[in-house]
Image: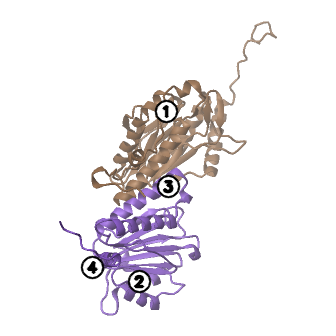
């Protein structure tokens, strides 16, 4: 049982307790990414809506150009009123989420009160910052943090960069290899005061379009019944959207997309059969 | 040249025990009891900010009586030990028995080796899937561990309160009933305790993960008899 004298007590921070006891992993001394195939988690988005935030992630993990997992989860509850979504090297990212969840719970238990949402966002920024040496060796982790601010009564979003830079976004945030496409979809579909259902549909559409353009992002897998993880965070807390609902909404999305394709004639590529002439 | 007086070890231990017991007896007592849907911990505590009862882990609660800074230090050490164990192994591997043994080691060590013993009595409670799996460990200032079955009382007047509780507690009590029994035992026949004199928390058997829940003072009057 760890005991400290008042002067060198690590306080309510679990990560500094872990460091003090020498339990944190050592930073690799050479470029891991260049020597080994590191598993990477990809696209995640978060969108603010009227009652809070929606946070979503695809299910694919890749090592180089191979798919290493079809059903990994990248969206996690951080505590009752906040969630974190990860992109980057999957191993260190999972470890960071585990440590972050514990960090918040540990603080709450030791201090008897919860951290403010701002405080939680800063904590995550410090964890990303302390991962910088590992990021330099190919193990970058870039999360998104989203939560419901009970004080301000609104959903809030935070994006990070690999140096631990913390940027609060007013409307939406995205991270990972497909974030450019996913972010653009959300950017075009966003408006103030989205309902919960509209926000879930927008997140689903963003993940789908990212998967359509980026090979490292996985789309809904109808054969195995694997769908993106989508969660809402409102005054009632973190709630994962059931898979059945996502399957249902996805069918709706497919109908819309398929209806746009009706009547489009596919121009065939030049073929050798016709001597290079188009038919 | 001065020679230190010889003091028999029995006398040293007795003096220390008396000292610790006196310190503990100055504070107010605390009751923990098993009810149908969990474990109730009810402390007589006029302060709404300086807690005697708190959460250690998913299904484990902590309570202390005696000197506040000492049991609070033990509480934080317990939270740290539990969180570290859950981090290094798995959440299921954290259990009350191992924590209680840890506490007993520390209290025993301090009692025999330090200048002064800790003036505390602590409780480590773990709620199980069924009442048969509930665990209540009552640990004394000298590291003595008592494994209680149904209820336990901590503090100066423990024996009197326990004998009162014996008459009030039954196997099938619900939360309301257990709270009435606990408050009745704590107050005795000559006093009555209001919501503002109490600190109440439960470990809920059916909770998915974190079972510890405080019953805040604003909702407490609805549950009191």
Which residue matches tag 4? B26
Residue A249 at x, y percent in the picture: 61, 46
Q: Residues within 10 Å of mark 1 (few under 14, many from 20)?
A: many
- From the rendered image, report the letter of the chain displayed in brown: A
* Distance between mark 1 and mark 3 Cα atoms: 40 Å
Q: If you read the primary sequence from the N terminus, does the residue marked by circle 3 or circle 4 appear first?
A: 4
> Which of the two discs, 2 and 3, sits closer to the camera?
3
Residue A181 at x, y percent in the picture: 53, 30
Quadrant where the image shows the C terminus of chain A: top right
Say which element carries label 3.
helix
Q: From the viewer's perspective, tell me whether residue B159 is left or right of residue B98.
A: left
**Residue appearing at x 33%, y 52% in the figure:** A11
Q: Are marks 2 and 3 on the same chain?
A: yes
* Distance between mark 1 and mark 4 Cα atoms: 63 Å
Q: Residue furthest right?
A: A273
Per the rendering, the mark at residue A183 is 1
* Distance between mark 1 and mark 2 Cα atoms: 57 Å
Quadrant where the image shows the N terminus of chain A: bottom left
Looking at the rendering, which quadrant does residue A216 occupy?
top right
Q: Residues within 10 Å of mark 4 (few under 14, many from 20)?
A: some
Query: Does residue A225 appear in the picture of this structure?
Result: yes
Say which element carries label 2.
helix
Q: If you read the primary sequence from the N terminus, does the residue marked by circle 2 or circle 3 appear first?
A: 3
Looking at the rendering, which quadrant does residue A173 occupy?
top left
Q: Residues within 10 Å of mark 2 (few under 14, many from 20)?
A: many
Which residue matches tag 2? B182
Residue B56 at x, y percent in the picture: 44, 63
* Distance between mark 2 and mark 3 Cα atoms: 33 Å
Nearest the viewer among A137 and A88 is A137
């Amino acid at each position: 049982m760890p005991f400290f004298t008042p002067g060198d007590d690590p306080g309510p921070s679990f990560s500094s307790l872990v460091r003090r006891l020498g339990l944190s992993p050592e930073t690799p001394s050479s470029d891991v990414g260049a020597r080994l195939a590191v598993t990477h988690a990809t696209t995640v988005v978060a969108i603010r809506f009227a009652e809070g935030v929606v946070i979503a992630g695809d299910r694919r993990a890749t090592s180089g150009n191979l798919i290493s997992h079809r059903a990994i989860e990248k969206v996690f509850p951080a505590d009752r009123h906040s969630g974190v979504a990860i992109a980057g090297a999957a191993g260190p990212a999972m470890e960071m989420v585990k440590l972050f969840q514990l960090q918040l719970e540990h603080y709450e238990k030791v201090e008897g009160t919860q951290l403010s949402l701002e405080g939680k966002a800063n904590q995550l920024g410090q964890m990303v910052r302390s991962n910088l040496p590992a990021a330099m060796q190919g193990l970058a982790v870039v999360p998104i943090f989203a939560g419901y601010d009970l004080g301000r009564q609104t959903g809030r979003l935070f994006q990070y960069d690999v140096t631990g830079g913390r940027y609060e976004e007013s409307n939406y945030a995205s991270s990972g290899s497909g974030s450019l496409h996913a972010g653009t979809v959300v950017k075009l579909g966003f408006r103030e005061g989205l309902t919960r259902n509209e926000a879930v549909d927008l997140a689903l559409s963003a993940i789908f379009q990212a998967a359509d353009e980026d090979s490292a992002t996985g789309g809904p897998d109808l054969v195995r019944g694997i769908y993106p993880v989508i969660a809402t965070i409102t005054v009632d807390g973190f709630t994962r959207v059931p898979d059945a609902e996502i399957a249902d909404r996805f069918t709706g999305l497919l109908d819309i997309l398929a209806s746009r394709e009706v009547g489009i004639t596919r121009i065939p590529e030049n073929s050798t059969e016709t001597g290079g002439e188009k038919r | 040249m001065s020679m230190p007086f010889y003091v028999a070890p029995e006398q040293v231990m007795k003096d220390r025990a008396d000292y610790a017991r006196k310190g503990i007896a100055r504070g107010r007592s605390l009751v923990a009891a098993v009810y149908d849907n969990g474990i109730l911990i009810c402390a007589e505590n006029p302060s709404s900010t300086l807690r005697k009862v708190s959460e250690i882990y998913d299904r484990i609660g902590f309570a202390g009586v005696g000197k506040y800074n000492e049991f609070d230090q033990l509480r934080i050490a317990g939270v740290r030990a539990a969180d570290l164990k859950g981090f290094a192994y798995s959440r299921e591997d954290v259990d009350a028995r191992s924590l209680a043994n840890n506490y007993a080691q520390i209290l025993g060590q301090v009692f025999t080796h330090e200048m002064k013993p800790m003036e505390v009595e602590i409780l480590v409670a773990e709620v199980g899937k069924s009442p048969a799996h509930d665990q209540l460990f009552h640990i004394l200032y000298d590291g003595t561990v008592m494994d209680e079955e149904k209820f336990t009382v901590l503090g100066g007047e423990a024996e009197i309160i326990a004998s009162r509780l014996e008459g009030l507690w039954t196997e099938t009590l619900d939360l309301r009933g257990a709270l009435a029994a606990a408050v009745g035992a704590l107050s005795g026949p000559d006093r009555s305790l209001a919501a503002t004199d109490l600190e109440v928390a439960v470990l809920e058997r059916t909770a998915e993960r974190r079972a510890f829940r405080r019953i805040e003072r604003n909702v407490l009057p609805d549950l009191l008899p």
